Image (cartoon, rainbow, N blue to C red):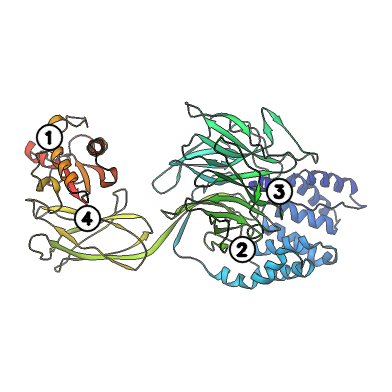
Amino acid sequence: MSTKFSIVFLCLGLFVLSVRGQKSNIKKGDEVFEAYAYINAREIYLKVVEKGYESAQIYKKLGDTYYFNSEYVDAAKWYKKLLDKYANQLEPEYYYRAAQTFKSIGEYYLSKKMMGEFASRSSTTNLAQNFMDNYPALDSLVDNESNEIDLVNVTDGMPSSDFGPTFYGNKLVYASSSKNTEGRKIHTWNGLKYLDLFEAELDENGGLINPVPLKGDINSPYHESTAAFTKDGNTVYFTRNNYLDGKKRKNKNREITLKIYKATKNNEGSWENIKELPFNNDAHSVAHPALSPDEKRLYFSSNMKGTYGESDLWYVDIGPNGSYGKPVNLGPEINTEARETFPYISKKNNLYFASDGHLGLGGLDIFAISLEDNGDYKKITNLKKPINSSKDDFGFIIDEDKQTGYLSSNRNGDAGSASDDIYRFKKSCGVQTLEGVVTDAKTNLPLQGAQVILLDENNNIIAQTTSDALGSYKFEHVLDCNKRYGIRGEHTDLEYDPNEKTILASGDGPIMEVNITLTPPDCAVNDLGCRLNLQPIYFDYGKYDIRRDAEVELAKILEALKKYPELSIHIESHTDSRSNSTFNLRLSERRAQATLNWFVKNGIDRKRLSAKGYGETRLLNHCSNGIDCSEEEHQRNRRSMFIIVEP
């Protein structure tokens, strides 16, 4: 991990060098190092070493310039030299840093050895106690990887550091050092541009589309990162360097700390009215805001007074008038003497956070814990591989209902680059077998030659097959847990009416049985419009308003819905193949939704209704594009159907 370290709080434990040779160069390097300009300090120290000078302090700081930028391969090189030549001059924290570094490059045996040295020299610390209690379990953590998680890098190929994602409606907002904004300064910590907040639309696979900086006053010449939005999307909390109204402020140590700010969105969609939160302070950093599901509590990370380690997780209560309570530390069950940072609270009130103080696979690992209403905590859980890696993993967000989300990681950084990327993950149920029998609805006899199609939630075809002589079909496919799929049966040769069933992939078992009945074209058993003898529901050309003659027919269904409160229906709108297919799809969707809204306006609970437009994708006959058909043949495809939904 690289850029984020400029916004994670550090107790550097800097020491004064007393040297003779290369004194002026070392003094200059120390001054740059103490200003957190690690890239510049590194260049100075390397020149000193190249001229034959070495010392414990030089090796410490050289290792640190790589360690604090998560360039662990190079950090290990200098820490090994330090251990080989100056082991008797090391403070306990260097054994801890060496252990974290070796673990991050996969040298777990050496990491255990270094943690043992750290524990023996710091036996009274919680970190040492954690090691003695939990480090033997590291082997099982290393060897245990879930095969139910699919992980995809959505910022792969972007020449920037990208991290700290957050949901913003149907978009993703994240911090980036992208070059897409002109005039930003280079940060001497890591040699990258200062961070801005970007937003991107999401494609159907969760990938980023057209990332652009957030509009308005939210981005400054310095760092912005890690945002948290209210549910209405009109207020945002975000992290920024100590910079407001064009002025940069430093504390008494001449450090630019981090603070949480609040902004509101105007009618043009730009962010304005930037305000600093009252519990900020120039003396310490406050960062990485996260809202509770009820928006009555704001969580964050800070090294303020009362912190157990380098940074802890805290919260403040938000009053009904927008006031903020006093910061409350989450306590030693969660916080350690190392770093706890990047909190996220899910809709189910689970806390996800990054830490290098709890037992993990690398530098920062992602952990989860349930937040109980009474303040009690359950056991902290490491999310294991592939969510966690041997590098730094942090900035985790999740939609637990869909079992999908995003995280930040520098796992793909090579020896010379530890740039952060954003990964999308989704839980897979693994290979599921979907099987069943296609039968005639009237005779209950099996139907051979029926086409059976497996569809995703966007009506895209995943796979298709044909029923055999016994009417049987089978799919074997990797399904995403808690995601809906459609299984559609049709027999166009015999002109059976198509039938579709919706399933929810649960992963409860490897086999799901879904039987499908197809009805001859006189009247489908679940076609409410047919059973009520409705006249066709017509719309004016190119329009989707409900006509008066259509209202007469819809009223029949309305009475049925009122008479049978357990009845739920799915509204399907179809077009013929004439006109552009994209136009037909949009038009049919608008007609379907207009029909649904008509029922809602007339007193039917929206939960009992669903609607979808299929355009020309489900023609009942051969009248596809370019085929010469009569008006009557086209009319058969230009239809609305009202399907009884099975409980």
Local crowd size for mark 3, using a 10 Å CA cut-off: few (<14), some (14–19), many (≥20): many
User: What's the residue type where badge 4 is placed?
Assistant: Glu
Residue bearing mark 1: 552
Nearest the eye: 59 or 123: 123
First in residue order: circle 1 vs circle 2:
2
Can I make out residue 111 in this image? no
Can I make out residue 80 in this image? yes
Tell how many labels.
Answer: 4
Q: CA distance from mark 2 to mark 4?
A: 47 Å
Q: CA distance from mark 4 to mark 1?
A: 26 Å
Q: Position of residue 391 (x, y in %)?
A: 61, 58
Q: Mark 2 or mark 4, which is nearer to you?
A: 4
Q: Is residue 457 above or below residue 245?
A: below
Residue bearing mark 3: 303
Residue 617 image-quadrant placement: top left
User: What's the residue type where badge 2 is placed?
Assistant: Gly
Query: Residue at 53% across / 46% down in the picture?
Result: 165
Residue bearing mark 4: 646
Q: Mark 1 or mark 3, which is nearer to you?
A: 1
